[in-house]
Image (tube, helix red, strand yellow):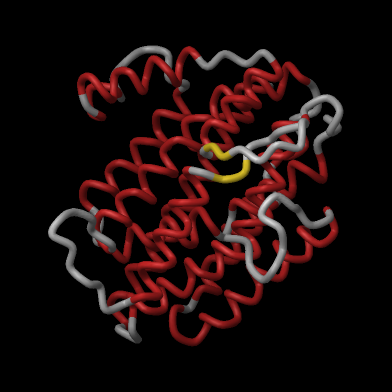
Amino acid sequence: MVSGTEDLGSTPSGSAIKNIVINFWHLNLTRYTESMNLDSLIPQKDKLENHPIFTRINSIEELVIFMEHHVFAVWDFMSLLKKLQKDLVPMGSPWLPNPNGNLVRFINEIVMEEESDVAYNQNGDTEYTSHYQIYLDAMNEVGASTDSIENFLERVQSTGIHKALTCEGIPSPSLKFMGHTFELIENGKSHEIAASFAIGRESIVPLMFQKILDQSKLCNDQVPVFRYYLKRHAELDGDHHGPMAHKLLENMSAGNPEIEREIVEQASRSIEQRIEFWDGVHGALT
């Protein structure tokens, strides 16, 4: 849910979102410097923040290429989140109480908003859909093909993730990025998965999306659904989900130096994978 009493469908101004994004990263680095030594991530963060991909989405044709790559990262984000939900907030019957209400709230609230947020609707009616579906709608808006991602998901459902990752039609940068995600999902410790989610996704997504909003020459009249998707993520992740995700890491590490080291190492790997992913997408645009 959106914090405070703000209406669920409202979004803050561009300048407000920018302040949220800028302050969020630096405040959290400051807060964790002594215990987790997150200052070691600053060079990667700066490299990501200044990636040339953010200045290359200036035409519909460029946006189509970008989205046909990025949609796979939109999807695999949810797989990372659902793995956290499965491990930390298991569901089923008979129900057993979880003593950590904050943890339950954090995971279930993010899942709720990612799977059933306010849809883009010009008619003023309030409808709900997943962020993934909003992204597909944004792709349809500009004529980007969804065939590759839809065929991939059909293969996931019918044959499983490993065989699906061998099917043709997945852009190489997207395939490599998903490979990192699912290797972590299958073999990572819970706090390593949480580190990738909290620092490698929730912390950097608002920063990246705000960069696109600021630097793309595509205006709201041309791509309203795409810009709605970016603004919605910048708002929720920067102002709400991101701080909650860092609180999760704080609870999971509990001052254990070995766990803190593994959190920082996995966060570094995840940010590097994002940089390499953008490198590949940028190459496809040049």
Name which residue lies at 28% across and 48% down: 185
| Picture coordinates of residue 15, whole percent (x, y) | 85, 58
Rendered view: 53 above or below 149:
below
If the image is split into quadrants, where does the C terminus sit?
Answer: top right
Q: Is residue 246 left or right of residue 253?
A: right
**To which quarter of the image does residue 61 belong?**
top right
Q: Which one is nearer the viewer's eye here, 94 or 62?
A: 94
Please tell me which residue lies in front, 220 or 209: 220
Which residue is located at x 40 percent, y 72 percent?
249
Question: Residue 43's x, y, as percent?
Answer: 60, 62
Q: Quadrant of the N terminus?
A: bottom right
Residue drawn at the location 35% of the way across and 86% of the way down:
255
- In the figure, 127 relative to 38: above or below? above
User: Can the viewer see residue 81?
Assistant: yes
Q: Residue at x 51, y 40 (%)?
A: 276
Residue 68: image location, x then y, percent:
56, 22
Q: Residue furthest left?
A: 94
Left or right of residue 10: residue 194: left
Along the viewing direction, whichever of 201 and 276 lies nearer the viewer: 201
Q: Quadrant of residue 23?
A: bottom right
Residue 90 in the figure: left or right of residue 124 = left
Direction from residue 259 to residue 74 in the image, left or right: right
Which of these two is toward me, 131 or 34?
131
